[in-house]
Amino acid sequence: MKRAVLFDLDGVLVDSHHAQLAALAGFATSVLGRRVTVADLPTWAATTPREHVLAELGYTGVIDQDGWDAATATATLTVEVFPFVTATLSALRAADVATGIVTLQSRQRVDWLLPPVVLDLIDVVVCYEDAAPKPAPDGLLLALDKLGVAPGDAVFVGDMASDMHAARAAGVTPVGSGWGFSDPAALTRAGAAVVLPHTDDLAGTLLSLTGTRRQDA
């Protein structure tokens, strides 16, 4: 029986908290015609869809993707992959567990954010242009279809309420990332089956959740 672990990207695999806020401030500056800094953003900016944040700042127009990518190009230079990522993905591959990313980022930005050594350990990547965004389940279901894995044999690790809702709607076990953008209690309220408080032995925990025996033990 084939099993899979799917991941959100921002806040789960990459430490992009400040970069996301900087991108929001940069885009707001370009469309509002006035300087907007990270300090000017609402306190809930990191855990709220960008459309809502921009509306709070006074912009209700369409978010041009080229303009958004331009605003994030510099911000993402400071983004780093979390230290546990490569070892965790390697352990999942060694145990024959498929892996995937389901993200609201564009495919171009995924290539900016993840080095080749990490991308090579991911079996499928579903981006915003590939499926309806979370909390819709479409992206998760597309990833699992490509992997040939049934929803009941997969978990999805995310750090937003929308991630938990998407997993529930897809029939995938929702796992909260306690090191991400959202408060662990918010992830529990959103339906997480479990919230992992830290990344210690993350591979072992994920293998246990999928019912898979670790191969490198």
Image (tube, rainbow, N blue to C red):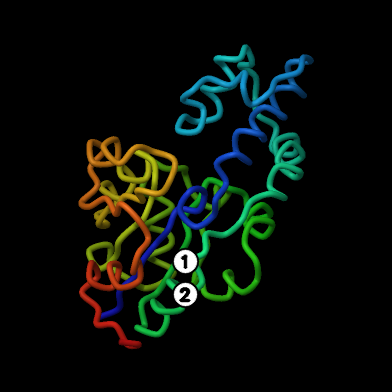
- On residue 212, the disc is none
Kind of residue indicated by mark 2 = Ala
In the figure, 21 relative to 108: above or below? Answer: above
- Provide the secondary structure element on which disc 2 rests: helix
Q: Residue at x 65, y 29 (%)?
A: 63
**Quadrant of the image containing the C terminus:** bottom left
Gap in angstroms between the C-alphas marked 1 and 2? 6 Å
User: Residue 84 got which mark?
Assistant: 1
Alpha-carbon neighbours of circle 2 within 10 Å: few (<14), some, or many (≥20)? some
Residue 212 in the image, given as x and y percentages of width and height: 24, 78
Percent position (x, y) of residue 214? 29, 82
Q: Residue at x 68, y 47 (%)?
A: 76
The quarter of the image holding the N terminus is bottom left
The answer to whether 47 is drawn above or below residue 188 in the figure is: above
Query: Which residue corresponds to mark 2?
Result: 87
Name the residue at 65% across, 66% down. 115
Relative to 117, residue 109 above or below:
above
**SS under mark 1:** loop
Proximity of marks 1 and 2: CB atoms separated by less than 8 Å:
yes
Label 1 crowd bin: few (<14), some (14–19), many (20+), radius 10 Å: some
Spot occupied by residue 41 in the image (x, y as percentages of width and height):
58, 21
**Residue at screen point 43% across, 53% down:** 139
Left/right placement of residue 185 relative to residue 11 reads left
